[in-house]
Image: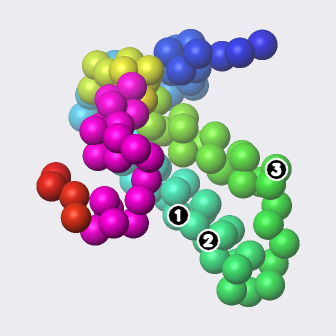
Amino acid sequence: MTLSLNDYQQLALRTAGNHGDFDRTLMYTAPGLNGEAGEVAEMIKKAFFHGHNLDYDKLKKELGDVLWYAAVMADALDMPLAEVAQHNIDKLARRYPEGFSQERSRNRQE
């Protein structure tokens, strides 16, 4: 089964405790997103610098948590998750029309 981003967002909202309260939703999703992204970074750091094995199942779980917070935050901002994703892809296509290059990254106009 393939799950669309907007379907995922709607399913994620079933477990969003403050759904409908804009301020409270942003107040818990912003630090939550930061915290979960930090857990991903910590796993990568430990794998590369502390000699830990990179646990792909745990990494998938943490990336899922990042996605959950992004989906709930986007909903509070009245942004369908697919629209957020498309906006990002469009931005990257403008920035790197031939694909990523270090040269273009160093000399971008944005």
Looking at the rendered structure, the secondary structure element under dot 1 is helix
Q: Which residue is mark 3?
A: 57
Which quarter of the picture shows residue 76?
top left
For marks 2 and 1, give the CA distance: 6 Å
Residue 42: mark in rendering: 2
User: Mark 3 belongs to which amino acid?
Assistant: Asp
Q: Is residue 31 left or right of residue 24?
A: right
- Say if residue 103 shows up in the picture: yes
- Of residues 12 and 6, the one nearer the viewer is 6
Q: Is residue 11 visible?
A: no
Rendered view: 16 above or below 37: above
Q: CA distance from mark 3 to mark 1?
A: 17 Å
Q: Report the span colored magenta.
A: 86-106
Residue type at numbered disc 2: Glu
Q: CA distance from mark 2 to mark 3?
A: 15 Å
Earlier residue among tags 2 and 3:
2
**Residue linked to disc 1:** 38
Residue 17 at x, y = what percent?
48, 28
